[in-house]
Image (spheres, grey):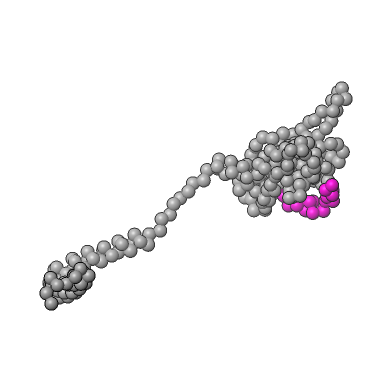
Amino acid sequence: MDVQDLNKSQLILLAVLLSFVTSIATGITTVTLMQQAPASFTVPVNRVIKQTVEKIQQVEGKTVTQTVIVKEEDLVVDAIAKNKTASFAVSKETQDADFRTIEVGVGRGFAVSTDGIVVVDGNLVGSTGVYYLKNDSGKFKADFVATDKIGFSFLKIGAPLDEKNKIAFTVPQFGDLDKMKIGQKVLVLGSGISSSMFEGTNININVTKVNAGGMVLNLDGEVLGIALYGEIADFASSKLITEALKSAAMPQTP
């Protein structure tokens, strides 16, 4: 059969076959020549091939390690942002010198349960009086629940002062004070923000009426306890709060 008589498909198959045969012949010829070549030629060639293969393998198996530096300032910002929606401003009705009813601030508090229990400074919040809790979702009446002997109290979020407002808050994650190391920084999130150092068995905090009832946080944003404005203690751990919460008699929601 003449090549000119082949159709297009047959020509393609013929070209592939010739290419395959040529490749085999080239490989056999190369191997034969390499076997017959002197060592002065084959050794450098083999060395180049070996080094090339090693470089390719190293690049393919290379592990890239990236060091990320986290600034303390970033940790502080994240810790505060994480707990912002759990914090409340606490106020109380009282009378001024002219016997007019006014409202005064009595520190801060933060949510400790999903059913609306807020822990506050018991030195400023007692069993009598009319109290209010306020956060970004609005202002709400507060029902007194109980006071612990350490110096903190529990309030329960009640009805909103504005019917349009719907309560929204988060419950922070509690941390373990026993895992803190001496020299680690702690934050007090009250009406303002202050910091202190963990000194061992306790946390030494300068508590004023401005940060009373504030969350005491580690740099991971976990709540270690509450800041107290009292003579008995200036701090109560999250463990004590949890234990007191379990034994407190909660008012029924109307």
With respect to residue 26, does 157 lie above or below?
Answer: above
Residue 161 falls in image quadrant: top right
Task: Tell me residue 66's x, y (percent).
Answer: 44, 52
Residue furthest bottom in the image? 1
User: Is residue 240 a member of the stretch shown in magenta?
Assistant: yes
Q: Nearer the viewer, residue 202 or 109?
A: 109
Q: Nearer the viewer, residue 43 or 118?
A: 118
Span colored in magenta: 238-254
Residue 189 falls in image quadrant: top right
Q: Nearer the viewer, residue 118 or 42?
A: 118
With respect to residue 24, does 227 lie above or below?
Answer: above
Which residue: 86% across, 25% down? 100
**Where, quadrant-wise, is the N terminus in this rendering?**
bottom left
Task: Tell me residue 23's x, y (percent).
Answer: 19, 71
The answer to whether any part of residue 207 appears in the image is no
- Left or right side of 91 for 34: left
